[in-house]
Image (tube, coloured by chain):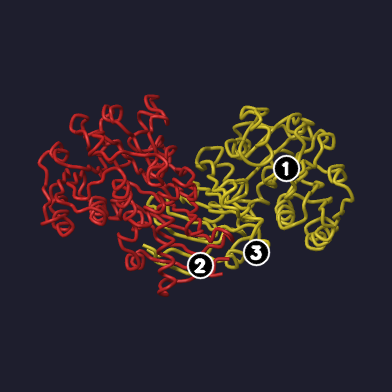
Chain colours: A yellow, B red
């Protein structure tokens, strides 16, 4: 049996952000219903925190089964701040393998860096649809890089962006973001914030996509009715806000205790799994209810830290399209 | 950058059991020294024990870093007793991905079913070299299938096999094994046992490679100075022997508590991680000493249940050979 192989350029030609947003929503629903199976990812530390080997990087193995596509898959993805930036390579390196779930035959192998970027944007946009009824919003954005772009693309699929207020430590990055993303925002209304605090002022939803190791978002900046998404590998917001938020909602409880914003407090024993109100899947599948923030006036901390199921589900759509259109190489491994 | 792709037939032409035995030994040594990093595998249950999905199968994600090759890799492998036997497919389905550890560039994707079969044979043969000084042995073998063949091939690399006593529930399998493996055993001295007990009688080393869900090896069959390797996914030997064995030695403590022979007693709380005397890596790297069984007269239970590091290390050799000889396809994923 032949395995279809797909390059990043092919994937770009086969799928849009709209496709990704739709399949991410279905995948959350499946996670809530139990028809999407997603074990916690396993980390291979290549010097991100370990002393050996000293490569300042990691690889995560992220398997999942997607009921509505009847496929299983695994993303093996990582990044490093060692050789990759020196060689001018993007931070993320990722391949995705797909098997037909009933027969375990390998049906596809594809680059997964582009899929990772798109689905990460889509995760917060889809989750937001279930936390507020507003569809005309102001978006606050920390980080004007690649992830800032894909977050904006995804929100623009489900929301009218009246305004975006963006902050980046590199002003040139904000300028580039403004030029690139103006068409996604009503009247091109992108404001480059002069201070980090300014981002939170009028925002309905605030997204953090930075590499910062500072806990830069202050508790007192977040007002009732605001939703904060700290998406990075690091914490990005104060401990105080994590403790004071009215609801904590995550995509994967076990993973969120070990990586990202919550992991520090969890390790210190100051946060428990039971402090999480719901998973996004439970909310999307209507197993746990959330009153829209504009009515509840709650401050919500939402953490879609990233699950393999999102990548596998997107990969399934990509593979289907590639077959229909006859795109991609083929290889007989077995 | 192009990724090299290798099929099972190519891999068969590039590597011998001798190569695999040698690299398995180096890998154990690295595990003991801490220069091979092997997190516990993560299981995706596709109906092996879960109720949903009902495919009677699983996939295991097994990442590792190999210091002496400076590569990281991941085997994604599984099997099922559902559609695969119905379609006349082998039980195992496996692909291996390799990255250059410093740069995380994907340097290879290859079939891993053949590698899995070879390294599983090699694991017990290499471990045996450190548990006994004898090099002329009688091997007892439960299971005359594919794994029975590769076990015999691997032992024949490091030992003179004076005799093999084999038992299989299917007599035809034993007959085929005898014909296939006669050349690996001195004077073709392979005896087909009429009863399971007969396998243990004169054996120095006893290997179990069956799919049996019975705990068929009895405590009283194992004599002082014998080494038992229950290699299957199930238990294969009595609880009583696990409790009475003088030493328990495993390849990976965390994994061995959750799969294979020890998992049942571990779940019941009747066995602890501290009941394991050493890892095979610690023994090979001389961090823990073992008196040869013919001197200690101990009964040793040894469990090389299988680690991703073995597959990744073998894959590294295969890839090196393929590059030298210009074998394999190439694909540009990124």
Q: Secondary structure at mark 2?
A: strand
- How busy is the neighbourhood of tag 1: few (under 14 within 10 Å), some, or many (20 plus)? many
In this view, A16 is above or below B131: below
Cβ atoms under marks 2 and 3 closer than 8 Å: no
Of all chains, the one bearing label 2 is B
Report which residue position mark 3 lands on. A89
Report which residue position mark 1 lands on. A229
- From the top left corner, tell me how far across and down residue B294 is, in percent: 22, 39
Q: Is residue B213 left or right of residue A205?
A: left
Do badges 3 and 1 share one subunit? yes
Of tags 1 and 2, the one toward the viewer is: 2
- From the top left corner, tell me how far across and down residue A334 is, in percent: 36, 62
Q: Is residue B146 visible?
A: no
Q: Is residue B168 left or right of residue A47?
A: left
User: Mark 3 or mark 1: which comes first in sequence?
Assistant: 3
In this view, B257 is above or below A18: above
Taking the view exactly as shown, the residue that stands out farthest to the bottom is B326
- Which corner quadrant holds the N terminus of chain A? bottom left
- Frontmost residue, B163 versus A105: B163
Of all chains, the one bearing label 3 is A
In this view, A97 is above or below B171: below
Do badges 2 and 3 share one subunit? no
Report which residue position mark 2 lands on. B3
Marks 2 and 3 sit apart, C-alpha to C-alpha, by 16 Å
Marks 3 and 1 sit apart, C-alpha to C-alpha, by 27 Å
Q: Is residue A290 left or right of residue A294?
A: left
Q: Quadrant of residue A330?
A: bottom left
């Amino acid at each position: 049996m032949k395995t279809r192989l797909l390059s990043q350029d092919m994937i770009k030609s086969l799928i849009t952000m709209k496709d990704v947003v739709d399949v991410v929503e279905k995948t959350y629903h499946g996670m809530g219903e139990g028809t999407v199976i997603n074990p916690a990812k396993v980390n291979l530390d290549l010097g991100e925190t370990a002393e050996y080997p000293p490569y300042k990087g990691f690889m995560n193995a992220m398997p999942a089964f997607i009921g509505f596509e009847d496929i299983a898959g695994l993303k093996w993805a990582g990044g490093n701040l060692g050789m990759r930036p020196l060689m001018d390579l993007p931070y993320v390196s990722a391949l995705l393998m797909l098997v037909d779930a009933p027969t375990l035959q390998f049906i596809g192998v594809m680059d997964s860096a582009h899929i990772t970027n798109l689905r990460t944007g889509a995760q917060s946009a889809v989750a937001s649809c279930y936390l507020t009824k507003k569809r005309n919003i102001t978006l606050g954005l920390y980080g004007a890089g690649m992830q800032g772009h894909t977050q904006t693309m995804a929100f623009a699929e489900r929301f009218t962006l009246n305004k975006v207020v963006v902050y980046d430590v590199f002003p040139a990055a904000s300028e580039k973001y403004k030029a690139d993303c103006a068409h996604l925002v009503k009247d091109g209304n992108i404001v480059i914030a002069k201070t980090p605090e300014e981002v939170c002022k009028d925002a309905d939803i605030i997204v953090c996509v930075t590499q910062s190791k500072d806990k830069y978002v202050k508790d007192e900046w977040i007002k009732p009715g605001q939703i904060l998404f700290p998406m990075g590998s690091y914490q990005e917001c104060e401990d105080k806000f994590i403790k004071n938020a009215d609801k904590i909602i995550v995509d994967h409880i076990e993973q969120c205790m070990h990586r990202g914003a919550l992991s520090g407090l969890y390790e210190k024993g100051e946060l428990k799994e039971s402090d999480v109100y719901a998973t996004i899947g439970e909310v999307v599948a209507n197993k746990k209810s959330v009153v829209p923030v504009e009515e509840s006036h709650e401050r919500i901390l939402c953490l879609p830290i990233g699950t393999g199921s999102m990548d596998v589900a997107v990969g399934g759509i990509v593979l289907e399209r590639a077959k229909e259109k006859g795109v991609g190489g083929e290889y007989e491994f077995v």
